[in-house]
Structures are given as C-alpha cells and as structure tokens.
C-alpha cells in the first residue's frame, strides 16, 4: 500500500506548501509554483525510497503514481480557475440565484472581455495604442501549436481550415 | 515477485502505445470520435480493461505495485490525451487567440461578435449540461440552485480553489 500512501502524503505536503506560497504573493502562476514545489517534493520522495529500498520496480511504480496524482491535481485546479461551469457551481454554493442574474453574470460579452483580459495578463496578447488586439510572439507560438493539434485530432477540416466550436470538457 | 510489477508497467506502456496508434491510424478519421462522449468512452473503457488486467496480475503475484504502476501509466496517458483533445476542440481562450490574430479594427468588431455568439451558445449548453448531470435544478420562480450532488461537487471545487486562491472563489 505504500505505493499509494507515500505519493499521497508527498502530494498533500506539496499542496500545503503551495497554499502557503500562493498566499505569499510570490511571482509566477499557480501552475509554475506547483511544478516547482511538486517537483522538489517528488525528488525528496525518490531519494527517500532509494535510500530505503534501492532502485527497483516498486520505486518506479511509486514515482509514476505520484506523477499521475500531480497531473490530476493540476488538471482539477486549473479547471476550477478557468471553467465557467465550475465558477457557476461555486457561486450557487452560497444560495439559489435567479436565472436572469446568472445569465447577466455570465453574459457572453463579459466572458469574452474577461478572457481577453486574462490573455493580456499572462502575456499572450497585447493591445496596441490604436486599440487593436494583437498576439505576442508567445501567443502566436501557442496558437500555432494548437492549430496543429486541431488538425491532428481532426477538429479542423483540413480543406477549409475552419474550427467547429462546440462544448468541451471544461 | 518484483518482476511482475515491472512487467505490468511495461505491458501497460505497450498497450497505451497500441491504443494511441489505433486512434491515429483508424479512429480519428471516424466522425463519432470527434465527439467528447466517444473519445471519453474510448479512454474510459480502455482504462477499465487495463485496471482489470493489472488487478488479475496483482491477485496472482500479490504485488499491489503492479496495479498502481499500470493504473498510473494509463492515467497519465489518458489525462494528457483528453486534456489536449479538449483544449484543441473548443477551448474558449484559444478560440479568442485564433480568431483575433491579425485583425484590423473592423475585423475586431466582427470577430468579437462571433466570439460572443460562441459564448452565448456555450452558456446555453452549460446550464442544460449541469442540469443533465444532476448538479443544478430550477426551483420556483426561475431560480437556479444546487442539488445535493451539486453541493458535494461544489464543496470539492471550493477545497481546490482554497489551495491556490484562498477562501474566496476566483471571480
């Protein structure tokens, strides 16, 4: 059972340290902070396991379990941060709301503005003095990568190169 | 005994490579596999099969690590695949990046209107989707409220939010 309990204990520790780090307002996104903290915790875990039992398949299984748990945690906390559905569930937690209020809060215009604001904040877009929105080199690179992924997953018709925009997991 | 764990992990790795190649060569060209329901089932059923095989191996050898290692290998593969698939399919921020690229002032107005239309459609899908999942319901006076399951999920989300954003949900 240590193959599961040890990674869980290290993940719990990494999350606790992340919670402190996020409140200290250190530079970097939550994902960057978790990758750093989780990576250090993972290295400490591997060192402990190696010193206790040497290199073996048990150590590899434990390391993989830790990596999976970390990926799952990153997936969930980034989903909570970016998903409108998650945001809606969190809002309704404080009590029922009129459908109209919910519709106003998540008005498409506001959603688009909020996302553009986030994209500018993380350095993927910028607004020119003329008010035009342009992609930064980083944004352009990310966009190209996802265009290739769209083609790979066949979300985009290679002939027309148009994207059918539908719901996703988030 | 230790070899059983290694064999389970290498076997699962070979299996997920085959699973991925089957998608690349055959299934990605099939229209149903462009829908999230089918792509999710493709991974979920495969994950269950891998777990059952690893469970059998663990029962024979008594090595829980074989089961954990196999589950982790498949879990990392499926989660990474589904995350990329989902983002490439319809991530809203990525749609914004894509559509706003190289737009002049006139184009910008048109694209923003298109994005708002996408947002409106997503809003419609979102409310009905959450209701379909049994997480929210309409109460009297056209009010939206959480179901019991919705409260459970919302509490888990609040816990996750707390770890990175503090007690208040990100607006």
Image: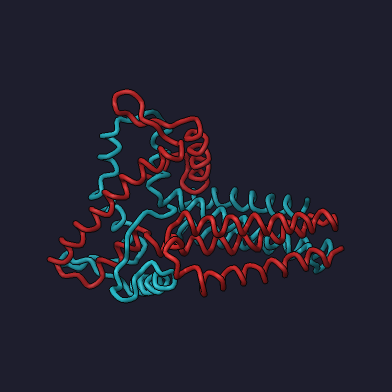
Chain colours: A cyan, B red
- Residue A145 position by quadrant: bottom left
Instruction: Identify which residue, B81 or B20, lies in the foreground.
Output: B20
Tell how many labels.
Answer: 0
Q: Which residue, as the protein is rendered here, is positioned at the far right?
A: B1
Which residue does the image show at 31% across and 46% down from the upper left? B123
- Image quadrant for the C terminus of chain B? top left
Which residue does the image show at 49% across and 42% down from the upper left? B157
> Residue A37, how many percent across, how many down?
59, 59
- Residue A125 position by quadrant: bottom left
> Residue A82, how many percent across, how many down?
40, 52
- Image quadrant for the N terminus of chain B? bottom right
Instruction: Identify which residue, A119 or A108, lies in the foreground.
Output: A108
Which residue does the image show at 47% across and 54% down from the upper left? B37
Looking at the image, residue B161 sits to the left or right of residue B10; the answer is: left
Which residue does the image show at 34% across and 59% down from the upper left? B93
> Residue A101, how many percent across, how many down?
27, 34
A105 over B117 or under it: above or below: above
Looking at the image, residue A71 sits to the left or right of residue B88; the answer is: right
Instruction: Identify which residue, B63 or B23, lies in the foreground.
Output: B23
Q: Which residue, as the protein is rendered here, is positioned at the far top?
A: B140
> Residue A76, how many percent across, how many down?
51, 51
């Amino acid at each position: 059972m240590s193959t599961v309990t040890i990674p869980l204990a290290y993940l719990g520790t990494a999350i606790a340290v992340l919670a402190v780090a996020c409140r200290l307002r250190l530079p970097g996104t939550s994902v960057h902070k978790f990758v750093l903290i989780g990576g250090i915790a993972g290295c400490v875990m591997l060192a402990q396991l190696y010193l206790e039992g040497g290199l073996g398949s048990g150590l590899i299984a434990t390391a993989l379990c830790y990596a999976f748990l970390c990926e799952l945690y990153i997936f969930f906390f980034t989903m909570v941060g970016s998903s409108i559905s998650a945001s809606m569930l969190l809002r309704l937690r404080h009590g029922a709301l009129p459908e109209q209020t919910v519709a106003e809060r998540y008005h498409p215009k506001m959603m688009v503005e909020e996302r553009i604001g986030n994209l500018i904040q993380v350095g993927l877009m910028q607004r020119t003095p003329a008010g035009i929105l342009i992609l930064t080199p980083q944004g352009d690179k990310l966009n190209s990568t996802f265009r290739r992924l769209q083609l790979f997953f066949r979300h985009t018709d290679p002939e027309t190169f148009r994207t059918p925009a539908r719901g996703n997991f988030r | 005994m230790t070899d059983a764990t290694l064999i389970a992990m290498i076997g699962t790795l070979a299996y997920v490579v085959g699973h991925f190649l089957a998608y690349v060569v055959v299934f990605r060209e099939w229209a149903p596999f462009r829908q999230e329901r089918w792509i999710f089932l493709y991974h979920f059923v495969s994950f269950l099969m891998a777990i059952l095989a690893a469970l059998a191996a663990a029962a024979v050898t008594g090595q829980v690590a074989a089961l954990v290692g196999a589950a982790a290998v498949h879990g990392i593969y499926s989660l990474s695949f589904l995350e990329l698939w989902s983002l490439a399919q319809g991530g809203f921020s990525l749609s914004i990046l894509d559509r706003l690229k190289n737009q002049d002032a006139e184009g910008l107005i048109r694209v923003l209107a298109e994005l708002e239309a996408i947002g409106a459609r997503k809003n419609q899908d979102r409310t009905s989707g959450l209701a379909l999942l049994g997480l929210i319901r309409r109460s009297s006076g056209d009010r939206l409220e959480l179901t019991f399951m919705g409260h459970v999920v919302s509490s888990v989300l609040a816990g996750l939010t707390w770890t990175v954003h503090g007690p208040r949900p990100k607006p």
